Image (tube, rainbow, N blue to C red):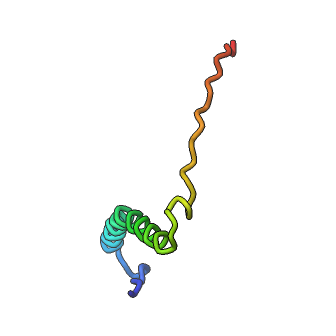
Amino acid sequence: MTTPDIASLDYAQLNQLRAHIDERMKEMRETGVPELRVRFSEAAAALGLSIEDIVGAPKKRKRRSRDHTDAN
């Protein structure tokens, strides 16, 4: 894959290139994470482990307690 010399592109060409890049990044965001999850799960299963054994269980979020004292 060759990278275009952006210094020689005019505004319209740069804008078109950016639109293509934005669309590609959106596609990668939508498909990349599920693909990685599947690959990790398959690799873990091949080792006889679960995905949680490798990456750990999700962390539980602690709720911040409200300060019920009056600041006035």
* Residue 13 point in image, percent of width and height: 31, 74
Looking at this rendering, what residue extends furthest in the bottom direction? Answer: 2
Q: Quadrant of residue 27?
A: bottom left
* Residue 11 point in image, percent of width and height: 35, 70
Q: Residue at image x 61%, y 32%?
A: 64
Q: Residue at image x 57%, y 43%?
A: 60
For the residue pair 44 and 24, the one nearer the viewer reads as 44
Q: Quadrant of the C terminus?
A: top right
- Asked if residue 21 shows in the view, the reply is yes
Q: Quadrant of residue 6?
A: bottom left
Looking at this rendering, what residue extends furthest in the front direction? Answer: 48
Q: Residue at image x 44%, y 80%?
A: 7
* Residue 15 point in image, percent of width and height: 33, 68
For the residue pair 38 and 49, the one nearer the viewer reads as 49
Q: Quadrant of the N terminus?
A: bottom left
* Residue 16 point in image, percent of width and height: 30, 70
Q: Residue at image x 34%, y 72%?
A: 17
Q: Is residue 61 above or below residue 64?
A: below
- Asked if residue 11 shows in the view, the reply is no
The total of numbered circles placed on residues is 0
Q: Quadrant of residue 54?
A: bottom right
